Amino acid sequence: MQAEIITIGDELLIGQVVDTNSAFMAQRLNRLGIKLKQISSVHDDEKHITKAIDEAFERADIVLATGGLGPTKDDITKLTLCRYFNTCLVPDNNVKQHILSLYSERPDVLNRLTETQWQVPQSAEILENRVGSAPIMAFVIQRNNKTQWLISMPGVPYEMEIAMTEQVEPYLLRQLNSIGLTTGNIIHKTALVSGIPESSLAIVLEQFEDNLPQNLHLAYLPKDGTIRLRLSGYDIDETIVETKFRELCNLVKEWLVLREDKPLEVAVGEKLKSLGLTISTAESCTGGRLAALLNAHSGSSAFYKGSVVAYDNNVKHNLLGVSEETLNTVGAVSEQTVRQMAEGVRRLLGTDYAIATSGIAGPTGGTADKPIGTVWMAWATPEQTYAECFHLGKLRDQITARACTRALIKLCKILHI
Amino acid sequence: MQAEIITIGDELLIGQVVDTNSAFMAQRLNRLGIKLKQISSVHDDEKHITKAIDEAFERADIVLATGGLGPTKDDITKLTLCRYFNTCLVPDNNVKQHILSLYSERPDVLNRLTETQWQVPQSAEILENRVGSAPIMAFVIQRNNKTQWLISMPGVPYEMEIAMTEQVEPYLLRQLNSIGLTTGNIIHKTALVSGIPESSLAIVLEQFEDNLPQNLHLAYLPKDGTIRLRLSGYDIDETIVETKFRELCNLVKEWLVLREDKPLEVAVGEKLKSLGLTISTAESCTGGRLAALLNAHSGSSAFYKGSVVAYDNNVKHNLLGVSEETLNTVGAVSEQTVRQMAEGVRRLLGTDYAIATSGIAGPTGGTADKPIGTVWMAWATPEQTYAECFHLGKLRDQITARACTRALIKLCKILHI
């Protein structure tokens, strides 16, 4: 059973919006055991959408479409699907009641354009959009002795995410079940490694890769100075995947950071929580990005207390207690400064651990001694303070992203994750 | 002149990686006046890549491909392109010298897999990859009396970005020029509005839209509680677009925040910088995200001084001076708390402006009085402190993103942007 995704919207094709929906749907399809064949992004254009659906149905039996369902003139997906599936729009009372209750406290939203939202294609099954007014439409057709499905969802990411998990997935399982089809068995196991170049890693793993069974596949995903190694098995016994994954982890143990496909900040947060320990950060070049990462996930208040973003040297001195002498002699991007920042914020906020960052994020401010990309970091613990210097590339966003990654990897080691 | 993008990599199809490359390339193509017809993401699979190239060349004359150029076994793009364009791999001495100098300080990277990187397709023109070892390959073919191009770039975003801007764009312009082709003229003008539902806005703009010339098009892009209104003109006189855009801004002036397609934090930063004023933040529910936004762009040290992320109530009290009485009576998510936080951080860091946030980001912690999504914010200025309460949805990431947006919109008003 294979699927395709079609994301619809001019904004994607002029680069005004990054398509994050596809990755979300792809992950969810994988969990259901449905392989994704292709993702296509097309314009809000009837001919183009129609062609893309035709092409997708040639390769797959399930098509998930997002976007183009708003009440405005540029959104034409609903009418296009009506013509494609040879049906017409009819008012749907359930959808109408839902929209009226959704906006019961915001009567200003209701107008004749909102009313078009409860006009739905007659031949489609309408799934509930709990958080929005655009209908989720499921079409089923029989073609060449096969059943094929197209499900259209809103393009607003959080509406799509709720639609996908709460409505579309159960719908697909019901449908496949009703015609006696089962989905495949897809297993991904991912390890995170750091500190070895991709090509060297590939040589370490050459023999391992050559000996993998045919339906087990290894992929390398470099990101922010780390490499995720993903073993993907298709219709294969889980114990074989487990055994091969243990073998893989053993081969790379020198560089292994995590044995799971989990964000580093989640691994760190879970460990701190389980130990009943707390953390704070003192950030210069990362500017709050490390703090935002640490509290991006639910439950972070159990281990994350707060941060001081000390972008300005006065803040480093006045709030964190970095000595003026240090700032005047070795400067803000130095071992002494980050040590004092980490120890300062640890004391100030009364946490068990603290991380400090100070570096040259660019594009200006680099010197011969401290070129752009130089980042000093310190980790203060109840026992001692560690400090390290890194060279993290040339681009601002890349430097701060990699600094956060380095900060969390070292913390993993300190916490024996 | 139309283009297509093909992004290659299993990681995209299992949702392990979000395709950010396409939006970047799309924007750049638009600047050159080249329309993007479709984006397709396909597996690291020779047949599938070949089919996708065939389909793309049916619709467009320029195909940009990214991904699959690493030295590891899962990367097959280079060999696939060799077979597609009926050519073979030959060693390239320039590429070899470049790779050797690139890794002159990291001899551990050089091994027999790295060496495969200077094997390049004989019929391709090789463009320089300044920051990486994967070759950028440009193929030209003549088909049906037309010239068509395929350019293959690395999939690592920062390598691709440098390749695209420094090499691929000049290459394309040279190529088009050499055969006497000029690119079209694409103009986008975007206004950001806030405080009106999309459907109501569409009614306000109905007549305006109906009267637009045929090659001028209006699109609505809702995001984080705002709507970007984009006027797109194709091969149209710039003064017509300007006139229509002024008319549009006038029609929506009640809700208008920005007249440019510029991130809010950039608009705020530029204004503060031009006035010589500074800002700090005190963040609870946004947890450093607002700080990270304010200093994400170059030059932020001119106006951004620092932040206190006061996730924990003790930090709110001890560092920012929020009174214990306030925290014990009305609680952390209250007007009094955010006022004291904003004024506290403004005093503590000595800035002209300060923004404070405190809310229930969920998924736990909501009450009947203060449901999930409730966010109090305050803006301290040299003259007075403003405070407002918002209800920003139900999902953690959405709530903090919208809170940052609200914080910056209000600051735009205060700064008369």
Image (cartoon, coloured by chain):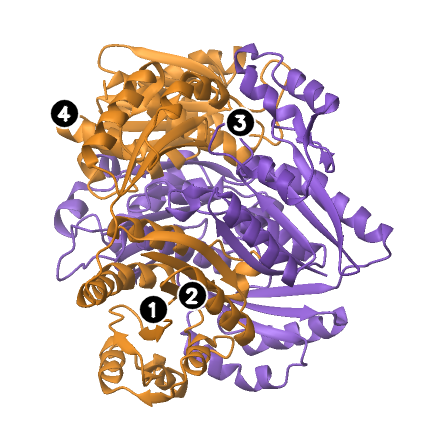
Chain colours: A purple, B orange
Q: Secondary structure at mark 1?
A: strand
The residue wearing badge 2 is: B57
User: Residue beneath label 4, please?
Assistant: B275
Label 3 is found on which chain of the structure?
A
Q: Quadrant of residue A58?
A: bottom right
* Residue type at numbered disc 1: Gln
Q: Earlier in the sequence, mark 1 or mark 2?
A: 2
Quadrant placement of the C terminus of chain B: top left
Label 4 SS? helix
Between A100 and B336, the one lying in front of the other is: A100
Q: Amino acid at mark 4?
A: Leu
**Residue density around tag 2, few if under 14, some if 14–19, many if 20 or more, within 10 Å:** some
Label 4 chain ID: B
The numbered disc on residue B148 is 1
Q: Identify the residue position indicated by label 3 in the image.
A: A71
Work out how far the residue at label 1 is from the one at label 4, CA to CA, in angstroms: 51 Å
Q: Image check: A298 left or right of B318?
A: right
